[in-house]
Amino acid sequence: MKYLTILFALSFLLTAIDETYAQPLSVSVEQPANGNRLFATPQGKFSVSGTTVRFGEREISDQSVWSLSAASNRFTYLDPTGGEVKVNQFSNSGYHLYSETLPFFNPDDSTLKLYTFTDGRTVIRDNVANFSFLNPAGQQLFSISNSSGSQSGERPSELAADPAGVTIVLYNPAISFGETTGSRAVLVYGENDTKLLFSSENQEITDLQVTPDGKYILLVAQDGSSSEIYFSDRFGNILFTLPSDHLVQGAEISEWGEYLTIYTTGMIQVYDVLTGERLGSASLNQNIIYAAYDPEKNIMISFGGVLDGYQISGSSVMVVDIDQRSITTEKISASLHTLDPQSLKLNRSASGNFTLKGLNEEVTIRY
């Protein structure tokens, strides 16, 4: 596989798009109905308020460790009452699928975390670096320690995967090496079967995503003043490396892995992965939460606002027409909510017609 490195600087030397003299682009955003906190599931609604979660016909209180699958068809939570930890899973209709006791789990461990796949498999982070993999019936398959072995300490490890759990990555976002801070990531294929994906003694991992089809992995690492983006296939072969002089907030890879959209504070750019060519860039007066690219219209789309917990206030959509060198802004009056900003995705329904998924209300963008 051909390795490609593109050196660039996010500066005024880049091709800029002047909003002041831009030709207006016709954009309409269908406003959400009421801004409620309910999230649609295949057979009902899901809502969360503090530590109270409602799923289907069920209401579960005082639960802080829970997970909703990407397809919203499985809901899993940990019950630490009675001095032991039980894992419970429900279907999207609220049917109780199982309740299993987890031996040797500490109910007072603040690092407990859940990850649920669409087939019902679950992964539990049961301490800073250990992960237990459960089958759809809640029975343990195997356990993996992701500890770096650093004597100076490390942050709790995280898991990134596609919704079906085909490609799974465990990563240490920050590892202390004394005077420097680094990170590492490993691919998990099964019990005692892992492969090193990334390792650095001076870069922290700030973002790691697996594409929905499980074919590609996107990793963003920072050293405190600059960033580097690594794009690989599911086997860990690096296809694309992109250094940046700025701290990248997030990145989005297109459905087929052809285009990479990155965004920093007030800046959005899109690249052709195969050639490394920068297709467009724009400076935006917006706190960007998510951005993507429409290759059919050669348009960049940005969604922004102020994120506070699950709530997004003062949100807006900005559409950048690269050919026309124009920017159009549409404000969203309703208050929106998201369970996870990384779950935001633009889905095409027709030419120039997109729906922003991952919110409590669908936001439709037409241009």
Image (tube, rainbow, N blue to C red):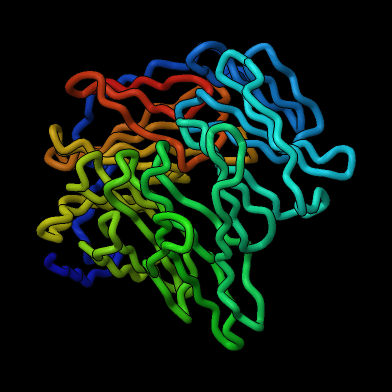
User: Residue at 81% of width from left, 32% of height from top?
Assistant: 62
Quadrant containing the N terminus in the rendered view: bottom left
* Residue 313 showing in the rendered view: no
Q: How many marks?
A: 0
Looking at this view, name the residue that lies furthest to the right: 82
Q: Tell me if residue 278 comes above or below residue 295 in the rendering.
A: below
358 with respect to 335 (left or right) = left
Q: Depth check: 326 or 332 in front?
A: 332
User: Residue at 57% of width from left, 25% of height from top?
Assistant: 335
Q: Tell me if residue 288 comes above or below residue 33 in the rendering.
A: below
Residue 35: where, in percent of width, then height? 57, 18
Residue 152: where, in percent of width, then height? 66, 82
40 with respect to 212 (left or right) = right
Quadrant containing the C terminus in the rendered view: top left
User: Residue at 24% of width from left, 64% of height from top?
Assistant: 237
Residue 84: where, in percent of width, then height? 83, 44
Kindly indicate the quadrant of the structure image that contains residue 351. Answer: top left
* Residue 347 showing in the rendered view: yes
Q: Tell me if residue 263 comes above or below residue 342 in the rendering.
A: below
Kindly indicate the quadrant of the structure image that contains residue 36. Answer: top right
Q: Depth check: 199 or 275 in front?
A: 199
319 with respect to 61 (left or right) = left
Residue 93: where, in percent of width, then height? 58, 13
Q: Depth check: 150 or 30 in front?
A: 150
Q: Tell me if residue 43 comes above or below residue 157 in the rendering.
A: above
76 with respect to 277 (left or right) = right
